[in-house]
Image (cartoon, rainbow, N blue to C red):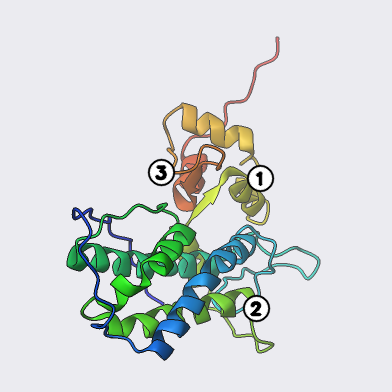
Amino acid sequence: MTTRRPASIRHSGPARNIDPNHLYLDRVQLRELVELLREIPELVEDLGIALTKQARLSSPGDYRMHRRPSEQPLPYNQAAALVADELHAVLVSWVRLVCEQRGIEYSGAPSTPGLARWLDRNVIALAMTEGVQDAPTDVRAVVKAAWQVICPSEARATVDHDRVEQARQQRMNVSGIVALAKELDESYRGLTARRVRTLRDAQKVAPVPGPWAPEWPELYVVGEVLDAHLAYPVRKRVRN
């Protein structure tokens, strides 16, 4: 699945009058689309659980490393991150199209659940938007992909180890990075939460720009933190 960076949502001015007699989707398609949209908020919560290591990382789309049978899997699910980004991007694209074509100002939250709820509330405007015939297919495909990550089939696929390198481009909070470091080689054993804060204070790494809710933890690009940890050795304290 190709991850797209979500585009910004344009605010296009006052809403126009909506005539429900001119729709590009029939009642069956509308009902299906609404059901999918209302499924997304709970789906996002489950993806969050999968992303923050509470799901084992042996399902398709995850990456593996050579490890002993007694070792725990890496506490990160790359597939969950990718599908969460794709889900957000798909919803942003349809919200933007509705706003631009129907002259509606977006008033929802910028989160994925917020986008889904806004489309649900404005489903008639969405149905009157030219090109909306593809919306049910797009949303259904990404929702299906998300459920496959959350509830993988019994069949397990062999994953290319290049996934490890791809994971370096993903975003994780400090706790996730520290837990991941414990599964890497000895050179990353000193990558603690305190070490990440030290690198941040020294401006060697920086959190990914938000916007985030105030209570949410800062996110960092995994590879940037790993590289900074190796590039700037820990200074050993000299005891008198």
The numbered mark at residue 189 is 1
Q: Which residue is mark 3?
A: 211
**Mark before the other along the chain sequence, 3 or 1:** 1
Does 75 sit above or below residue 19? above
Residue 238 or residue 148, whichever sits in front: 148
- The residue shown at (24%, 62%) is 99
- Please give left or right for residue 193 compared with residue 137 in the image: right
* Residue found at x 20% / y 54%: 14
Kindly state the secondary structure of the residue where label 1 is placed.
loop
Residue at disc 3, secondary structure:
loop
Residue 22 location, x and y as percent? 23, 83
Q: Within 10 angstroms of label 1, few (less than 14), some, or many (20 or more) residues?
A: some
> Badge 2 local density, few (<14 within 10 Å), some, or many (20+)?
few
**Amino acid beneath label 2:** Cys
| Residues at marks 3 and 1, CA–CA distance in whole angstroms | 31 Å
Between 98 and 214, the one nearer to me in the picture: 98
Q: Residue at x 65, y 70 (%)?
A: 57
The part of the image, by quadrant, that contains residue 49 is: bottom right
Sequence-wise first label, 2 or 1: 2
64 vs 33, nearest the viewer: 33
Q: Amino acid at mark 3?
A: Pro
Amino acid on which disc 1 is placed: Arg
Q: Are marks 2 and 1 in contact (CB under 8 Å)?
A: no
Residue 97 on image: x %, y %:
24, 68
Residue matched to label 2: 151
Q: Nearer the viewer, mark 2 or mark 1?
A: 2
Q: Is residue 141 visible?
A: no
Residue 17 position in % (x across, y down): 21, 66
